[in-house]
Amino acid sequence: MAKQVTVENLSVLFGSDKAKEQALKMIDEGYSVGDIREETGVTVANMNVNFDIQPDELFVIVGLSGSGKSTFIRTLNLLNKPTRGDIKINGESLLGLSKEALRSYRRKDVSMVFQHFGLLSHRSVLENVEYPLEIQKVNKKERIEKSRAALEQVGLKDWENSMPSELSGGMRQRVGLARALVNDPELLLMDEPYSALDPLIRREMQNELLNLDDSSERTIVFITHDMNEAFRIGDRIALMRDAEVVQIGTPLDFFKNPANDYVKDFIADVDKSRILKARNIMRKPLNVVTLDMTAKQARTKMEDTQSEYAFVVNEDKEYLGFIVAQDLEKSEARSLKKFLKEDHHVLRRNTYLSDALKALQSSTYDVAVLDKKQHLRGVISNDEIIAALAE
Amino acid sequence: MISFPEQLVYRISRFIDLGVDWVLDNFRGFFRGFASFVNSLFNIFDTIFSSIPWWVYIILLVIAGWRLYNIKVGIGLGAMLYAIGMFGLWDDMIYTLIIIFIGVTASLLIGLPSGIAMAKFSRVERVLKPLLDGMQTMPSFVYLIPAVTLFGLGRVPAVIATSIYAIPPLIRLTYLGITSVDKEVIEAGRSFGSTSMQMLFKIELPQSLPTIMTGVNQTTMMAMAMVVIASMIGADGIGAQVLVSMRRLEIGQGFQAGLAIVFLAIILDRIFQGIAKRFERSVTMDG
Ligand SMILES: Nc1ncnc2c1ncn2[C@@H]1O[C@H](COP(=O)(O)OP(=O)(O)OP(=O)(O)O)[C@@H](O)[C@H]1O
Ligand SMILES: [Mg+2]
């Protein structure tokens, strides 16, 4: 299962132990980061940060240089120690981990992608990707198999014998991504992974990431200083400024209710129609039934959720179509097969809203939103799309 | 009242003599044992090095120069080695080579772990840094005095003085190599859950290999310089030929031996530099 991350009252400070203690007191008394630095010489990089990152979410942290983004993401695998506060992964505190438990957490559950790739220049592409498995003493055969699969995922399978120095920047970052994916982590940390790349490649890499994320159950924390990038890929976004989180929400939340003028300025240049996607405004579907339910069970479900229709999925959660309550009236059928209406109006999660609108002119019901494995991820109505674009 | 007043002269040599006598009396067994160990090591390598025919050395050298640079360099280096033989100094050269070989190997065995410890523990760094600075400012023949005191004359003190004299650059560059590995690469290693041993052997040492090889090269060059001076305490080899010729005022002989030393130094330098460059190319990202 993907990981849920809970950040509780996190502060990260840099300085001597004694000065940090004084600085913590000053934080509690409400002094600003600048005052604290002047008074104590301590850098407050994160100050009272609180939020949850949901399982399977693509969570983006955005902010100007020096706002504390890297410091934050590095506490999620304990490359930085929290000075105060706690981080919980699926409810378990990271601070409570023993040395061995921390090592195992880093080996199995979490991976990181770096801004300048952090590749081992003395190893070939394949050997780089093998590294996380190699240090866990996975045998050579399995290691190579998994590494090749990871390289294939990022489109580099013909490059396994090259040295990193022979690759372009975009390709190097793909190696970095493959290396981070090879142990199939449930939490993926990406610290400005595309900032060192030129804009065209960057766009391409963003799409690849969305594509990759589309069919996987993995929590991703992504850092950027580019608001367009943040809105393009983020399910939710946290905007940081001077060690604090200014606003957290979906891209739509930012457009609807910017918390203050700083946020307004920050999003001023963002082109909404090229940003908002179905995934940004879809709702969790409640009226979902499985194909093997009896007609009676399906009726109950629709009554409970107060809807006149329901979405039908199979046992693998693949979307099949929908049923309408009218058709089922009084039926004692043991399966829903004969009522199933196959629906051609479905949306991909990553469809831009402006494109979605064109495709859905006449749909009266909610429309199913699917990922590339045909799993039902959410629902959306035509009105919602129009409203979102009109904001 | 121009010269230093006689009443103020106070000689400390007597106390030093006493101290040295005490050390020798109490650790005689240890020094004897160590000397015979070095001696037998020397004999073993002598047997090995002398059993290889001269033309094998030359062919191997030509090939090495060819692979590391190009065929011209290979032939050039081969010709230098041939010249040393032609001067009638082949056996002396082998002797010198063995002292260098043992000295550099000993330096490696001590220098690598010291350099690593220096990079990892700030306490070791605080002790070693001034020590290395001191060692590098001392003239080379100063190293001969304790070596002779403890081990007498001959090749054993020569080997020992050589390894001690030659060690600082290796420690320094190992330290430098490890501390200057790219920070992000270190973080990547840590973020995947490497143990500190895995960090050292799979990331830090391979990444600093070019720097360490530069250290090996410098150490070899220092050993080369020392070995010539060590002829003053009775070590054979090309250095001894220079010394003998100078005493007898045989200018031609002395010049010839000097040239052989230069050739040997060039050969060793080229080879080690070539290897260092190789490693460098394998770890640098750009270019
Ligand atoms: N190890 C450290 N020691 C001292 N200060 C640090 C350390 N790491 C970060 N800082 C300071 O903490 C503050 C936040 O830095 P951080 O790297 O988290 O910012 P960032 O938002 O990632 O910026 P950028 O976009 O430039 O990467 C900065 O003032 C930085 O100088
Ligand atoms: Mg940063």
Image (cartoon, coloured by chain):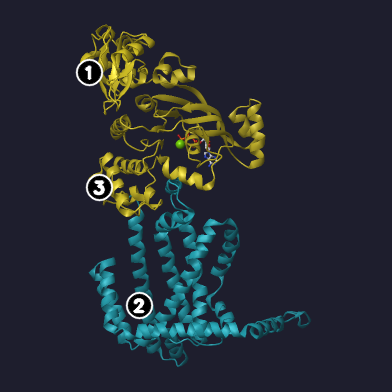
Q: Position of residue A283 (x, y in %)?
A: 37, 17
Taking the spot 53% from the left edge, 47% from the top edge, the residue there is A99
Of the two numbered discs 2 and 3 in the rendering, the one whose residue sits closer to the viewer = 3
In which chain is the residue bearing label 1? A
Asked whether the residues under the numbered discs 1 and 3 touch, taking CB atoms below 8 Å apart as contact, a structural biologist would say: no
Question: Would you name the residue on which mark 3 appears?
Answer: A159
- Let me know if marks 2 and 1 both belong to one chain: no
Q: As displayed, is residue B173 above or below residue A90?
A: below
Question: Would you name the residue on which mark 2 appears?
Answer: B263
- Residue A262 located left or right of residue A125: right
Categorize mark 2 by other alpha carbons within 10 Å: few (<14), some (14-19), many (20+). Answer: some
- Looking at the rendered structure, the kind of residue marked 1 is Lys
What is the CA distance from the residue labelled 1 to the residue labelled 3? 48 Å
- Looking at the rendered structure, the kind of residue marked 3 is Trp
Picture quadrant where residue A372 is located = top left
Q: As displayed, is residue A306 above or below residue B75?
A: above
Mark 2 element type: helix
What is the CA distance from the residue labelled 2 to the residue labelled 3? 44 Å
